[in-house]
Amino acid sequence: MNVITPIHPRVLMDTSQARIVVENIPDRPGTAAAIFSALAEAGIAVDLILENYARDGRTTLTFTLPEAQRHKAFELVQRGLEALGGQVLMHGPSAKLTVAVDHGATPATAARLFQVLARADINIDMISTADTEVSVVIAPADADRAAALAREAFAGA
């Protein structure tokens, strides 16, 4: 007998995030290890990590971390770039909106979230998915509005 368990999405907003974008770094084994090992040794935990399309042996790496650790992370990354090459393109506060679904997110979960944000003219800076959730990084100024819209869109889903 199959038992159908209701899906109750939870919408979570984290406004204590920051984002760092490092561009023009070498696209080779060990680059990410060098950057994130230095952060780990300093006790800085990163959340979302995205490596973009590489071109001509160089790539861009974007990651989020707690806002309270952003300046220390920036210093460590800058120091690491002296040996690696590249530059920090930007660093600043961010907000992470997550829609978590107890029994697995579906393709419709991401599509619904993206549609809600697009209709509200809220830009998505980063996207991450896992089995049970979809997360987006957005500008902090849009956080309250995005959370309210997402809660409304997923209420009763």
Image (spheres, rainbow, N blue to C red):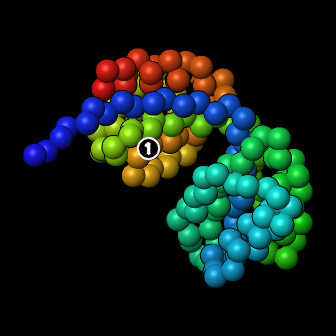
- The amino acid on which the numbered mark 1 sits, given as a three-letter code, is Glu
Q: Position of residue 63 (x, y in %)?
A: 66, 53
Residue in view at x 60 percent, y 37 percent: 96
Q: Label 1: how many residues lie within 10 Å, few (<14), some (14-19) or many (20+)? A: many
Toward which corner of the image does residue 137 lie, by quadrant? top right
Q: Is residue 54 left or right of residue 110?
A: right
Q: Is residue 125 left or right of residue 32?
A: left
Residue in view at x 50 percent, y 18 percent: 148
Of 97 and 3, the residue lying toward us: 3
State the residue lying farthest toward the bottom: 29
Q: How many marks?
A: 1
Q: Is residue 28 left or right of residue 7?
A: right
Q: Quadrant of the C terminus?
A: top left
Residue in view at x 64 percent, y 33 percent: 14
State the residue lying farthest toward the left: 1
Q: Position of residue 45 (x, y in %)?
A: 73, 55
Toward which corner of the image does residue 76 lie, by quadrant? bottom right
Toward which corner of the image does residue 24 lie, by quadrant? bottom right
Q: Is residue 43 left or right of residue 157?
A: right
Q: Position of residue 124 (x, y in %)?
A: 52, 38
Q: Secondary structure at mark 1?
A: strand
Of 45 and 89, the residue lying toward us: 45
Residue 97 sits above or below residue 141 on the image: below
Of 104 and 80, the residue lying toward us: 104
Residue denoted by label 1: 133
State the residue lying farthest toward the front: 1
Residue in view at x 48 percent, y 24 percent: 121
Residue 3 sits above or below residue 150 on the image: below
Residue 53: tell me if it is visible.
yes
Residue 16 sits above or below residue 59 on the image: above
Residue 110: tell me if it is visible.
no
